[in-house]
């Protein structure tokens, strides 16, 4: 997670930028008391990743409700990666120990559900050519 923290968005690959933009859209919609799925669906449609919306939504909900710590997220105009965004990037990064990151992120009963959601999201990103394994080079 820390390798992504405070990294410039411009240094992220396309998949990383998409993930951060999606997270920020989800968080802003929740803050505005709007449906986050409706708010970010156009991002997923534009990338032909509508099938990834459900696992992304599940992952974000698990992090929002069952996180072991309060996570920080940046506003859409911020040029660097915030803590909560870095966590999602670490979950999507194939070089990370996903099980350990999930266990550190959410309470024990929800670790497996978070792992499953992230694996489904990563698979959809791979199909769309967003290669989450190369995020944050």
Image (cartoon, helix red, strand yellow):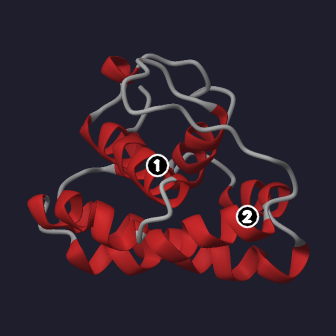
Q: Quadrant of the N terminus?
A: top right
Q: Is residue 68 left or right of residue 2?
A: right
- Residue at 17% from the left image edge and 62% from the top image edge: 42
Expressed as whole percent of the image width and height from the top left, the position of residue 16 reads 37, 40
Pointer 1: what residue?
28
Residue 67 in which image quadrant? bottom right
Expressed as whole percent of the image width and height from the top left, the position of residue 121 reads 41, 69
Q: Residues within 10 Å of mark 2 (few under 14, many from 20)?
A: some
Q: How many marks?
A: 2
- Residue at 37% from the left image edge and 24% from the top image edge: 77
Expressed as whole percent of the image width and height from the top left, the position of residue 34 reads 42, 66
In contact (CB < 8 Å): disc 2 and disc 1: no
- Residue at 12% from the left image edge and 68% from the top image edge: 48
- What whole-number distance in Å separates the C-alpha atoms at marks 2 and 1? 28 Å
Q: Quadrant of the C terminus?
A: top left
Q: Residues within 10 Å of mark 1 (few under 14, many from 20)?
A: many
Q: Nearer the viewer, residue 133 or 101?
A: 101
Q: Nearer the viewer, residue 47 or 94?
A: 47
18 up-or-down from 101: above or below: above
Dot 1: element: helix
Pointer 2: what residue?
99
Residue 78 in which image quadrant? top left
């Amino acid at each position: 997670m820390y390798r992504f923290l405070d990294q410039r968005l411009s240094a992220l690959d396309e998949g990383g930028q998409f993930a951060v933009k999606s997270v920020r859209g989800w968080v802003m919609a929740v803050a505005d008391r709007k449906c986050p799925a409706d708010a970010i669906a156009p991002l997923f449609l534009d990338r032909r990743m509508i099938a990834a919306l459900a696992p992304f939504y599940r992952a974000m909900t698990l992090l929002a409700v069952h996180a072991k710590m309060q996570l920080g997220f940046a506003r859409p105009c911020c040029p660097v990666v915030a803590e909560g965004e870095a966590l999602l990037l670490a979950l999507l990064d194939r070089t990370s120990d996903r099980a350990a990151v999930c266990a550190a992120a959410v309470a024990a009963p929800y670790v497996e559900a978070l792992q499953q959601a992230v694996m489904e999201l990563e698979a959809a990103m791979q199909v769309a050519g967003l290669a989450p394994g190369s995020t944050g080079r």
